[in-house]
Amino acid sequence: MTATNEAMRHLYKKIKTVGYPQRYVNTLLPEWWDDAIAETPSGLQQASLILGRLFSVQPETLWTKDAIPELVVPDGCKFKQRVDTKTHELDVACALARSAARLVLSAFKPELKPGFCPDAGELRQSLLSSGSPWVDFQNLLNYCLESGIPVIFLKHLPNKTKKMAGVSFTYDGRPVIVLTQVKPHGYLLFDLAHELGHITLGHTKNGVWVVDEKIDSDSDDEEERDANRFALELLTGIPDCKIVPVGRQLYQQQLVNAAMRLGEAKKIDPLHIVLNYGHTSQQWAVASQAVKTIANNEPADQHLLVRSLLAALDLEAMSEDDLGVLKRLMGEDGA
């Protein structure tokens, strides 16, 4: 790569103002990139178009000298956030979610099936009828992908960028779910069920993005409560399911044994039972240890997500540059 010229330095400075430091930008640029591209007026416009496309920034605000850079973030975002979070703090994560969705949908093979099952109980029975002992992350993920709903793991963000736990939205007429949870087992199951609830219940109609900074089962927001009830009914059969011990609090192995027994009897993923118990009783330490025991070094949910999504893409329809960017956004090497 040649030494950065004045025009390219100005571009890097501009894109930094909306949340993308140059070091981060360089991690997503194609291998053939050369900063010399911006040395001519036409090259500057081309560089601006490439950067704008990659980072969901209005490209004309990059090549126009005195323009203020603007992220492409929909006006219809419903931010479900903590009271101490400013809305704009999630803009970069939302812009990258949009970029990831654009890349995925350019090559996503499954067609969107008309209509969704509006009843979580019916969907639960449908998934269980395939022979699964319970609704787990892999079979719920498969349902989404086969229904034409991409589910994307977004990991690679600029340092110190605030992120959401999940976001559901429509892009180019297609529903999309983006998840960011990095804990390897159990947590993504409820997050996925919750975001599917937003889509199924119509919360993302008319271009609305539902951005969950934190997926909170105790939220007093009406749409959040509805999505939580959908998720719990889908996973447990009970819309307000709270798993509590009978008698004293459980030790790790006791919790593991109880979760396995209850899971088989009630057709509930033992990992969800453990995490539901941890949340309800605020016994997170013992719940975390029980999750590790039940998971038993199985591949992380994030790995399953990335692998399943890539299998649903027509890779020949994607350029090597776009595929490389998508993989880096999903943190495939470390997922």
Image (spheres, rainbow, N blue to C red):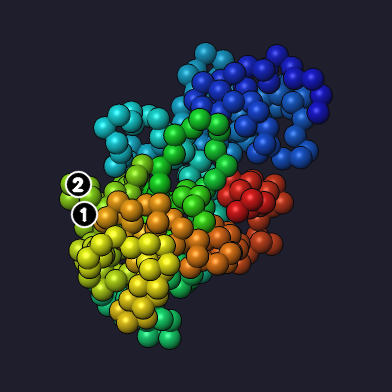
Left or right, 178 with reference to 216: right
Depth order, front residue of 239/281? 281
Q: Is residue 164 above or below residue 9?
A: below
Dot 1 corresponds to which residue? 225
Q: Quadrant of residue 29?
A: top right
Q: Tell me the tag on residue 29.
A: none
Question: Where does the image place residue 254, in percent across and percent down from the top left?
Answer: 38, 68
Depth order, front residue of 143/108? 143
Question: Where does the image place residue 167, in percent across and percent down from the top left?
Answer: 39, 48
* Residue lying at 37% horizontally and 85% vertically, measured from the top left: 129
* Residue lying at 46% horizontally and 73% vertically, measured from the top left: 139
Number of residues whose C-alpha sits closer than 10 Å to that of mark 2, classed few (under 14), some (14–19) or many (20 or more):
few
Dot 2 corresponds to which residue? 221
As measured in the structure, the alpha-carbon distance from the residue carrying label 2 to the one carrying label 1 is 6 Å
Residue 310 visible in the shown view = yes
Three-letter amino acid code at the position of disc 1 = Arg
Instruction: Locate the N terminus and report the quarter of the image it occupies.
Output: top right
Task: Provide the secondary structure element on which disc 2 rests.
Answer: loop
Q: Is residue 214 above or below residue 273?
A: above
Left or right, 316 with reference to 225: right
Count every numbered label the image shows and give the total.
2
Q: Is residue 28 above or below residue 332?
A: above
Residue 42 visible in the shown view = no
Farthest-out residue, right:
2
Task: Provide the secondary structure element on which disc 1 rests.
Answer: helix
* Residue lying at 76% horizontally and 40% vertically, measured from the top left: 31
* Residue lying at 36% horizontally and 78% vertically, measured from the top left: 261
Three-letter amino acid code at the position of disc 2 = Asp
Question: Where does the image place residue 132, in percent across and percent down from the top left?
Answer: 43, 81
Left or right, 227 with reference to 305: left
Depth order, front residue of 105/268? 268
Question: Label 1 near label 2: C-beta < 8 Å?
Answer: yes
